[in-house]
Image: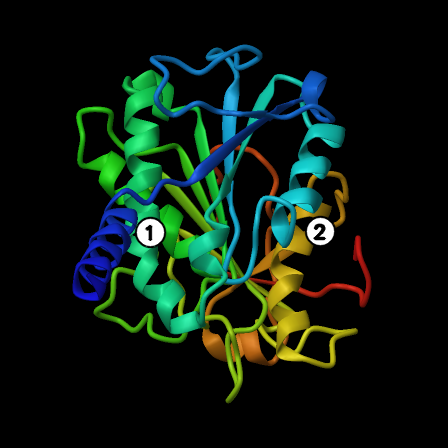
Amino acid sequence: MWKLAIILAAVAVSYGQAKLVNTYVLYTKGTQNSPQTINVDAMSLATPFDASFNTIILVHGHGGSVNSQLNPLVKDAILKYQDPSLNVIVVDWSREASYSYSVAVESVPLVAKDLGDFIIKYFPLPADVAKLHLVGFGLGAHVVGIAGRQVAATASGPVARITGLDPSGSQWGTNSARLRRTDAAYVEVIHTDGSGLFSNGIGTALGDIDIYANGGSNQPGCLTNTCSHERAYELFAASMFNTNLKAFPCSSSTQLNLNLCRGNPLDIGGVRLSKTGSSRIYRINTKRNYPF
């Protein structure tokens, strides 16, 4: 009897892992205080989703949820300060993100595939994915990268933009499935905790444009790596309304490290689906406190 119970428990665990499903919550300007959890088994996204609007999909990192990390701050900033013709979908993968970092890393491909399947189902046409902006923080940056890669391999083509907010560094080396500049038509990365023994982020340039805040680590006003890491999504949220958040192009890592980057400034973050810069690497110097 006990052996049967153990076997059934093992099967249940295996089935649960195979059937992993993210939760997707829809917000719009008019429903900011009454979000709608999307029924992923439905044939189409329910009202108040408007397919003619651009859509931003937010993905938290390790330890996060629909109600923590970038989601409330970034979502609220977008809906308050940007064009009301926007859909915001928040992805909750908090069950897997709540485990140890190494276990959460192992879940990233499954979480990403669920997101990729979601996009392919509800945004099936090239015109649909051309309106998509995926934003991920920490491990969430790799989630959106892998999901974007999956979507790009379909007839729909690449999503318009991915923004990686201090992508996680540990266990995401050169030969890993980490975020890449080919995962979307335009990939922007903001680095805030990319160097040092206990850094959370990755300092390597991964996107079409990589922006290093205050050199990419040791953020002003922060005493811990966690604070510097989280500064990435705080900067992105602030970019929705702070027009002074401009980065300057660097011709080399030496210029970046010595704070000698000069040239035509680039607005960081924001919701524009594409940008053009004179360099791949940029530096922005910020104040100590939000909105910088």
Upstream in sequence: badge 2 or badge 1: 1
Inspect this view and state whether residue 289 appears.
yes
- Which residue is rendered at x = 58% and y = 12% of the image? 48
Q: What residue does disc 1 label?
A: 181
Residue type of the residue flagged with mark 2: Leu
Query: Residue 207, percent across and down?
Result: 39, 54
- Which residue is rendered at x = 79% and y = 53% of the image? 291
Query: Residue 23, percent across and down?
Result: 46, 37
In the picture, the quarter occupied by the N terminus is bottom left
- Which residue is rendered at x = 79% and y = 73% of the image? 221
Above or below: residue 70 compared with residue 85: below
Horizontally, is 107 left or right of 99 in the view? left
Query: Residue 220, percent across and down?
Result: 75, 74
* Secondary structure of residue under mark 1: loop
- CA distance for labels 2 and 1: 23 Å
In the picture, the quarter occupied by the C terminus is bottom right
Residue type of the residue flagged with mark 1: Arg
Above or below: residue 71 compared with residue 38: below
Inspect this view and state whether residue 123 appears.
no
* Secondary structure of residue under mark 2: loop
- Which residue is rendered at x = 49% and y = 70% of the image? 201
Q: Which mark is residue 245?
A: 2
